[in-house]
Image (cartoon, grey):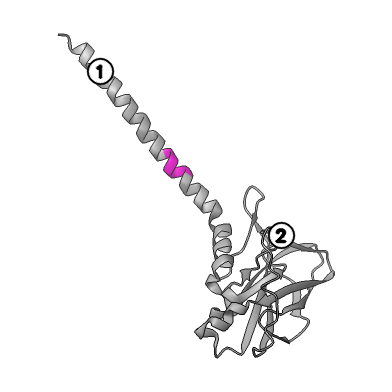
Amino acid sequence: MSAVPRLSRGLATAAPRSCRWTYYTLSLILGTVALSYGSVPMYKMICQTTGWGGQPVRAHGTSNDPSTDISDRVVPVTTAKRIKVTFNASISDTLPWKFVPQQREVSVLPGETALAFYKATNLGDKDIIGVATYSVTPAQCAPYFSKIQCFCFEEQRLNAGETVDMPVFFYLDPDLLNDLNMRRVETVTLNYTFFKARYDNNGRFQPPVSG
């Protein structure tokens, strides 16, 4: 028998194997690229869901979860002690803004909603887009600090010389009363830091990571 048919069969068998390895390699590359693009938003989403990294949990029933009612979560527990919430603000060195809380502190009951404000002023002579990250200290409070409305992780454009008020609407989840780690906590601090917004080579906004 001629060696030519055997060689043809060998090539025919090797071709599908080569294609399969090509598919596997391309899938791995594409998966790695997708993970790189999605890592920052994914990190933010995980932190907001679990309270990792001192990030407050996004409240159920917000625009991202309209099917869930939070009315049973925002009932003040009048038998509980009040918790003092203080506010901090800072900016990065590259952002020519002034950014301050408009109140030093508020005192709330678990389940009681509260509204606080920050004030931002663009001190530069050009319009600038900033973005804020946030965290809560002590860290064990983060899973119970639920924000109904805030300005974090979103682009905030201020014209040159413009001043704006930025609201934060929040509550402390009553479940904190069942957490032994919260028994001795009397003060919670909400920290915001503003950065100059960054964009990739394709003009896509790059959210900063709070750490």
Total tally of numbered discs in the picture: 2
Specify whether residue 22 is painted magenta: no
Q: Quadrant of residue 178?
A: bottom right
Give the residue number, with chain letter if any, for mark 1: 9
Q: Quadrant of residue 144?
A: bottom right
| Residues packed near mark 1 inside 10 Å, few (<14), some (14 to 19) or many (20 plus) | few
Looking at the rendered structure, the kind of residue marked 2 is Ser
Residue range highlighted in magenta: 26-30
| Residues packed near mark 2 inside 10 Å, few (<14), some (14 to 19) or many (20 plus) | few
Quadrant into which the N terminus falls: top left
**Any mark on residue 111, and which?**
none
Horizontal and vertical percent for residue 196?
Answer: 69, 65
Horizontal and vertical percent for residue 67?
Answer: 68, 58
Specify the principal SS of the magenta part: helix
Identify the residue at image location x=67%, y=83%. 77
| 64 versus 177 height, above or below | above
Looking at the rendered structure, the kind of residue marked 1 is Arg
Left or right: 30 with respect to 107? Answer: left
Compare residues 60 and 139 and report the one nearer the observer: 60
Give the residue number, with chain letter if any, for mark 2: 63
| 114 versus 4 height, above or below | below
